[in-house]
Structures are given as structure tokens and as C-alpha cells.
Image (cartoon, rainbow, N blue to C red):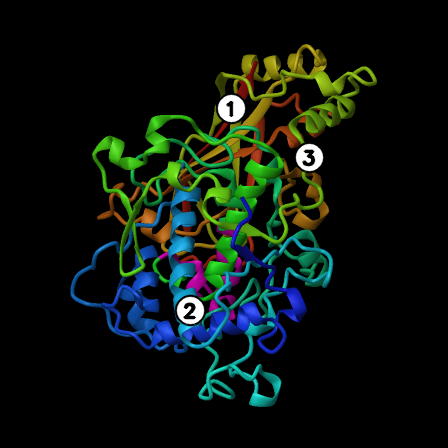
């Protein structure tokens, strides 16, 4: 079945209001939604509160001019799903509902009946090559004049304030330059190579995952706000993009945080929905293009109501739409598609990654045989190799913590690397950051055995990935659902361990884990990691 609606790239025709009709009508539709009362389920403010609301709304620097919150949450508010395997399907339903409302308003104002929400493909490298930058339509404070707009645009629009423009959007450097630090983005906006800080790269590496649960899509939970089951899609790119686009005013974390950096405010920034359209597109690519499967577990398919918890509900067509993950897994049945469903450059299959790993270890598989490999899935045996003895405080330029290793477990990893073959896949090594707490988020990159005082730019081969602390404040609230135990993350550090092994530098009693923030963390608002642990994952 051919989809009625196609979500297009926001960078089409230059990504401007005068050139891109999708963005122009998005701005017009958002503007109409902003005119409604916060208690109206068709208002911009109501939709923003569905993702999250709180007292922080009162301190937002206009624009947008945010109305006061009512004395209590209204139906459907603060139901966003994070750090859970429900993250992808809940946000897909949220986008569908928002898109439906904007389209209704677009049509009422004389716009196209086929209007669809565009996506921001910050991984795009062609036409133009700098799509890591925010589309210009979000930087224009006012609509263009009438001569630059189509004749069917309402007469009050030309020259009026642009609803897509947001003051509290500070970017990675806190200077209002809004870009996503993909590799291309960092090349265009390089940090000082002598800096103690590091832009953890935003990647699409999650598309290489082979399984949904506890990997691509998150771990099994009930109805969830920020616990310990963050999936790879959610951490990177989702969390990192939120943290970088919101940023901090002047990059001082004691100052104002951008809307996109906090889940209680993020839904008020119009760029939120284009970011999430791209996240939704990546899930579609994982399913449709890469042919990987969603869970068949009934607790996922039919949502948290299987555990007696609230269902997912969205305002739609003047009523309330109740949906489960099983209702939104197949975009071909949801009457929309994306202009582009090809995987971003650099994404590899599990078989390709396994072949490359064997080759790097000097155990290259026989020519022509890798296509038949069936044992590249992660192993089921997980064994603790080492952990920190106490919590780790991260402030200033970061922290460096020792993780003492169990010699026997380490030797088993070494033996698996030495004996690796197509028939005997070597161990993977995972790093776990548990009970990460703090008052404000950001991005932290992780390095293994980087020398004390070393500059991150000189030790890229020791990078184990990055974590985005989107939602850290909520997860750290002692009065919150989880008693302030914070967030937890798992990073695959196999490539780093392989390199240490090849360099004959893994015969150690202790590994040192460096936590490097993208910007300085004030001592008054430190981030604390309850425990850093390293695990062997064997077949």
C-alpha cells in the first residue's frame, strides 16, 4: 500500500521558510496551536506538557511566551517513555498525534492537505553537505516578507514573529551556534586540540545492533520515566542531540539550560519534533531496510497495561487515541513513510563487524565464508571482571577512576582473543555506569587507559563512546519515582580492549576509566557515578 503522507528532509530547498514549504507550513501551524489555551488538548502547550512539564516552565526566556501551568497536571501529561523498551513506540505515537494536529491547522489555513512533519537528518552528507547544522528556518526571528512567500499564505503571516525561533537554544558551545557534533559537524566546528574536554561524537552506530531488547531499543520495563534500561538508539543519537542542541547559556552550567536539554521543557521547542522524526526514521531503517525484528514479547507488544499500568494516550481528532506498541510497529500500516530510508554511511552489518574484528585480531576468516557466519550474536554468559570501590565524582574537566580487574576473568578474555576464530567468537567487553546522579545534564565521553593529563584528541583509539544525560535531574530527584537513584548506561568497549590486547597493554591489574565532559562541570553541580564496572560477555 502506498503511503498518503511522506516526511521529507528539512534541509530540502535550503531548509529555509521561503524555500521549504514543509517548514513554512509547520511554522504557520505551530503558530496557530500557540494561540490556544494551555488547557486545550489542541494547543502547543498541551502537547509540550504531554512529554513533560514542571516549574521550570515559569523561567523560560521568551520566545516562546509560555503560559502559566494549571495547578495540577491534565489528562495525558508527563507520560514520556525514557530508559525503557517503550521509548521508540511511545515517541512514534506522540509524533503521529502532533503531526495530525499541525496538519489539521495547516489545512484550515489554506495549506496543503498532504503536509507532513519533516525530519532533520543531521547525518546527511549531500545536498547540502552540512546538514549537521540546524535548518535555517529555526534561526529566522520573523517570517519573510510577502514577496518571498506563496500567495496562499494567510495575510497576517509575512513579517510576523516566526514560531520556530526559540531563545533558549544554545548549542554545543553555548554561543547560539546550533549544530550536531557528528564527525562532519566536529570537522566543521573543531574544538581546541589542546582542550581537556571532548565532543562525544553523535553516531548512527546503534543501527548495527542485532537485537532490540537490552540493545537497540532498551531494556524491559513497565511504564517508565528514566530508570536504568536506556537503549542504544535512545542514548546515541537521541540523548546526545538533545543535550547538544539545548546546551547552556554561555556554556556555564550554572546558567540557563536550553529547552532541548531538559525533558520537562524539550517538547516546547519546535525542533524537538524534527529530531524525533529522525529518531523514528532510524527505527524504520532498522526494521525496514536492515530487516531487524522488534520484540514479540506480549509485555512489549501490548504495552504497560499488561502489568496493570497506564496505557499510552494522545489527543487526536477531537478525542483520545489509546495505543500500544503493536499498533505502531509498521509504518506501512500507519499511512506515512520517509523520503529516505537508506542507512547512513558507515553502518555495518553484524557479519561485517565480526569479519573486521577477526581481521584486526589477525584471525581473518577464510575468503568467501563470512556470509555464512551465524554466531556473531552477543553471548549469553556475562561475568564481572572488575568495579570501582566507591562512587566517582565528576566535575571540572572530569574524573579518572581505577577499576581493579579479576586476574582470572581477564585471562579468560585474553585467551578468547588469542584463540578467536570464525567458529570461536572472542569475548565482548562491556562497561557499565550505574547510579549516575546530578542536578543538570550534558554529555560525558568515556576513555579507557588514557594517561593522566592526556588530551582526548590525542587518544581517540581509547574512546569507549559517550553518554547523554538527558533527564538526569529528573532521575536524580529523591522524591521521584525511583528514589533518586539516577541513570545507568552500558557501553561496548570491545574495540578498545582489542586494541589494548594488540598493543600488549591489557596484561594489567587495573584499567583506568576517564570521564570527560563536553564542557566544564562546576564544582557546585557535580555529577556522581555510583559505580563503574566492567564485564566479560562470552559465548
What whole-number distance in Å separates the C-alpha atoms at marks 1 and 3? 24 Å
Badge 3 or badge 2: first in the primary sequence: 2
Q: Say which label, 1 or 2, has the lower sequence index.
A: 2
The quarter of the rendered structure image containing the C terminus is top right
Residue interval drawn in magenta: 239-263
Depth order, front residue of 150/60: 150
Instruction: Using the image, tell me which numbered label, if any, was put on residue 237.
Output: none
Label 3 sits on residue: 348
Let me know if residue 405 appears in the view: yes
Q: Secondary structure at mark 1?
A: strand
Assess whether residue 255 is covered by the magenta stretch.
yes
Q: Is residue 152 above or below residue 193?
A: below
Asked whether the viewer can see residue 504, the reply is no
Of labels 1 and 3, earlier in sequence is 3
Residue occupying image coordinates x 31% and y 66%: 42
Residue 306 appears left or right of 116: left
- Give the farthest residue toward the left: 71
- Please tell me the numbered disc located at residue 255: 2
For marks 3 and 2, give the one nearer the viewer.
3
Q: Secondary structure at mark 3?
A: loop
Label 3 to label 2: alpha-carbon separation: 40 Å
* The N terminus lies in quadrant: top right
Q: Nearer the viewer, residue 211 or 17?
A: 17
Question: Alpha carbon of mark 1 to alpha carbon of mark 2: how far?
Answer: 38 Å
Amino acid at each position: 500500500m502506498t503511503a498518503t503522507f511522506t516526511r521529507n528532509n528539512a534541509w530540502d530547498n535550503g531548509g529555509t521558510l521561503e524555500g521549504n514549504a514543509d517548514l513554512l507550513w509547520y511554522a504557520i501551524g505551530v503558530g496557530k496551536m500557540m494561540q490556544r489555551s494551555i488547557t486545550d488538548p489542541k494547543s502547543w502547550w498541551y502537547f509540550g506538557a504531554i512529554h513533560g512539564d514542571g516549574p521550570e516552565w515559569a523561567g523560560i526566556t521568551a520566545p516562546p511566551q509560555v503560559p502559566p501551568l494549571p495547578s495540577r497536571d491534565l489528562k495525558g501529561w508527563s507520560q514520556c517513555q525514557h530508559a525503557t523498551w517503550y521509548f521508540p513506540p511511545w515517541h512514534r505515537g506522540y509524533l503521529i498525534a502532533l503531526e495530525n494536529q499541525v496538519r489539521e491547522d495547516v489545512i484550515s489555513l489554506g495549506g496543503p492537505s498532504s503536509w507532513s512533519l519533516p525530519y532533520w537528518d543531521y547525518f546527511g552528507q549531500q545536498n547540502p553537505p552540512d546538514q549537521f547544522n540546524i535548518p535555517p528556518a529555526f534561526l529566522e526571528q520573523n517570517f519573510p516578507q510577502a514577496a518571498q512567500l506563496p500567495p496562499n499564505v494567510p495575510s497576517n503571516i509575512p513579517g510576523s514573529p516566526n514560531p520556530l525561533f526559540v531563545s533558549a537554544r544554545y548549542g554545543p558551545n553555548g554561543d547560539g551556534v546550533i549544530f550536531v557534533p557528528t564527525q562532519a559537524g566536529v570537522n566543521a566546528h573543531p574544538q581546541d586540540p589542546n582542550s581537556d574536554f571532548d565532543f562525544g561524537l553523535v553516531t548512527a552506530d546503534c543501527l548495527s545492533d542485532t537485537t532490540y531488547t537490552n540493545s537497540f531499543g532498551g531494556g524491559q520495563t513497565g511504564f517508565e520515566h528514566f530508570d536504568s534500561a536506556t537503549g542504544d538508539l535512545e542514548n546515541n543519537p537521541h540523548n546526545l542531540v538533545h543535550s547538544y542542541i539545548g546546551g547552556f547559556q554561555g556554556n556555564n552550567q550554572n546558567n540557563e539550560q536550553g529547552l532541548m536539554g531538559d525533558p520537562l521543557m524539550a517538547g516546547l521547542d519546535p525542533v524537538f519534533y524534527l529530531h524525533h522524526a529522525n529518531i523514528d526514521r532510524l527505527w524504520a531503517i532498522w526494521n525496514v531496510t536492515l530487516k531487524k525484528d522488534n520484540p514479540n514479547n506480549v509485555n512489549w507488544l501490548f504495552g504497560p497495561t499488561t502489568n496493570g499500568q497506564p496505557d499510552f494516550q494522545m489527543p487526536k481528532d477531537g478525542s483520545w487515541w489509546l495505543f500500544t506498541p503493536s499498533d505502531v510497529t509498521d509504518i506501512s500500516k500507519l499511512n506515512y513513510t520517509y523520503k529516505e530510508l537508506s542507512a547512513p554511511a558507515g553502518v555495518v552489518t553484524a557479519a561485517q563487524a565480526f569479519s573486521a574484528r577477526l581481521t584486526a585480531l589477525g584471525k581473518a576468516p577464510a575468503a568467501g565464508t563470512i556470509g555464512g557466519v551465524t554466531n556473531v550474536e552477543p553471548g549469553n554468559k556475562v561475568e564481572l571482571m572488575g568495579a570501582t570501590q566507591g562512587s566517582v565524582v565528576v566535575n571540572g574537566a572530569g574524573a579518572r577512576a581505577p577499576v581493579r580487574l579479576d586476574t582470572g576473568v581477564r585471562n579468560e578474555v585474553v585467551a578468547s582473543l588469542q584463540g578467536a576464530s570464525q567458529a570461536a567468537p572472542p569475548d565482548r567487553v562491556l562497561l557499565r555506569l550505574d547510579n549516575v546522579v546530578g542536578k543538570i545534564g550534558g554529555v560525558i565521553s568515556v576513555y579507557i587507559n588514557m594517561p593522566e593529563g592526556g588530551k582526548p584528541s590525542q587518544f581517540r583509539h581509547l574512546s569507549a563512546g559517550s553518554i547523554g544525560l538527558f533527564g538526569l535531574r529528573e532521575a536524580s530527584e529523591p522524591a521521584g519515582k525511583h528514589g533518586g537513584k539516577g541513570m545507568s548506561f552500558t557501553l561496548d568497549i570491545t574495540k578498545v580492549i582489542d586494541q589494548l590486547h594488540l598493543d600488549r597493554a591489557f596484561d594489567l591489574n587495573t584499567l583506568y576509566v576517564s570521564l570527560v565532559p563536553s564542557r566544564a562541570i562546576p564544582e557546585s553541580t557535580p555529577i556522581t557515578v555510583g559505580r563503574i564496572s566492567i564485564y566479560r560477555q562470552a559465548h
